[in-house]
Amino acid sequence: MGFPVLDTQRLKLIEITPRHVDSIFEILSFEQVTQYYGTDRFVLPAEAAKLIDMFRKNYIEKRGIRWGIKLKENQRIIGSLGLNGLQLKNKRAEIGYELHPAYWRNGYTSEAIEEVLRYSFQELDLYRIGAVVYPENLPSLNLLQKFGFTKEGLLRGYFKQHDQFHDTYVLSLLKPEWEKQG
């Protein structure tokens, strides 16, 4: 079975391959993108190449799926999103995403999340989608809560970034909750 390509009104969610190194590098080189990402901003294209290799390995090993967010209007990769920590046996994963700052506040992330949630619950038959979000990342917290994610608690000292430990909230959305929204 090939990589699952997903379509929305304005976006095509595609497999990220080595030909997307420049786009992924550009996006993750912005400090405002990686500020709440759990990693420092990229300074070398080789970092993006390594990340893309990890995405591919995780997909092959059924431990994750990461889509490139491609605008249909100009074929540009403007971000990525996906399922981390995928456990098909336990029917759960964590969602994560980032978007180029030039495309913030246009509804692209919402559009992509909506389709990935549909795919996760209907096609993969997952029961739980989790998320880990810095408390300071209010746009992401608000976005996930808009989709019905429930804040479950605080993970203290969960990420080390910029030589500091950071707390994160853990949130989740269960399949029955998602189905009630439909």
Image: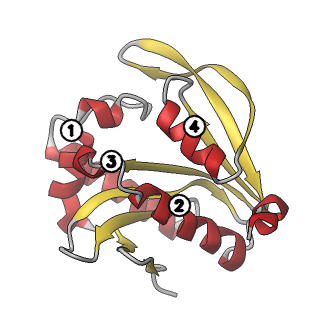
Mark 1 crowd level (few <14, some 14–19, many ≥20, 10 Å Cα): many
Which residue bears the numbered disc 3? 104
Mark 2 crowd level (few <14, some 14–19, many ≥20, 10 Å Cα): many
CA gap, disc 4 to disc 2? 13 Å
Label located before the other in sequence (3 or 2)? 3
| Residue 7 coordinates in the image, percent (x, y) | 44, 80
Which residue occupies 72% across, 46% down?
Answer: 172
Which residue bears the numbered disc 1? 29
Amino acid marked by disc 1: Ser
Which residue bears the numbered disc 2? 113
Label located before the other in sequence (4 or 3)? 3
CA gap, disc 3 to disc 2? 14 Å
> Does the image show residue 29?
yes
State the image quarter where residue 34 is shown. top left
CA gap, disc 4 to disc 3? 15 Å
Amino acid marked by disc 3: Trp
Label located before the other in sequence (4 or 1)? 1
The answer to whether mark 4 and mark 1 are in CB contact below 8 A is no
